[in-house]
Image: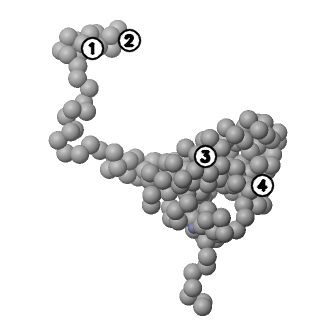
Amino acid sequence: MADQPRPCIFCAIAEGKIPAKKVYENSDTVAFLDINPRSRGMSVVIPKKHYANMNDEPLTSSNVFQVSQNVVKMIKDSLSPDTVYLSVMPSQEVPHFHVKLYPVYGDERPLSESQAVKASDQDLEAISNSIKSATVNLFSAPKGEEKSREPEISEEDARYLRTRAEIA
Ligand SMILES: [Zn+2]
C-alpha cells in the first residue's frame, strides 16, 4: 500500500468525485473556488486531464490560461476587487497543473512574496544570458527559413535610413 500513488484531488474534482464550488467549466477545463482562500473569491483553474507541468500539454495549458482570463473577468465583474493576481506554482502536494487566481482588495496582498535572493550584477548577467540563449534555441527558425525572416529593405531605403541616422 505504501507504494500506491495518492489519489489526485484535482482529478477527483474534475471528475465530480468530490464536491467543489465550480465557477466555470468547459470540455477540458474547470475553475473552482479554493477551499482555503487567501482572499475572497480565490479560484483555481485546472485542465481535466492530469499532468504536472505547463509544458507537458502546451495546447491544453493555453486553454487553461484562456479560461483563467475569462474567470478573472468574471471575478472582476462580480466581486469588484482592485485587481486579480495570478500564479502558476507547481505543487508537490497536488502535482496537477493549475493556475491560481487571487482577487486583491485594498491593502490585502494575498500572494505574499518570499524573501528575495541575493544576486550580484555578474550573477544577473549570467542568468540573463543563460535565459536568452535558451530562447534563441526555442524560437530559431527551421533551416531554410532563416533568410525569409530578415526584413527586406531596398537600397534606396537603406540610403535614406543612413542619412537619417547621420542627422540624428
Ligand atoms: Zn490530477
Instruction: Please report whichever mark, 4 or 2, sits nearer to the chain's N-terminal start.
Output: 4
Nearest-to-viewer mark from 2 and 3: 3
Instruction: Please report whichever mark, 2 or 1, sits nearer to the chain's N-terminal start.
Output: 1
Q: In which of the image's four quarters is ligand 1 placed?
A: bottom right
Judging by the rendered image, the residue that carries numbered circle 4 is 38
Dot 1, how many residues are within 10 Å of its Cα: few (below 14), some (14-19), or many (20+)?
Answer: few
Nearest-to-viewer mark from 4 and 2: 4
Circle number at residue 162: 1
**Residue 72 image-quadrant placement:** top right
Kind of residue sitting beneath label 2: Ala
Where is 4 relative to 122, above or below?
below
Circle number at residue 53: none
Nearest-to-viewer mark from 3 and 4: 3
Instruction: Please report whichever mark, 3 or 1, sits nearer to the chain's N-terminal start.
Output: 3
Judging by the rendered image, the residue that carries numbered circle 3 is 68
Dot 3, how many residues are within 10 Å of its Cα: few (below 14), some (14-19), or many (20+)?
Answer: many
Kind of residue sitting beneath label 3: Ser
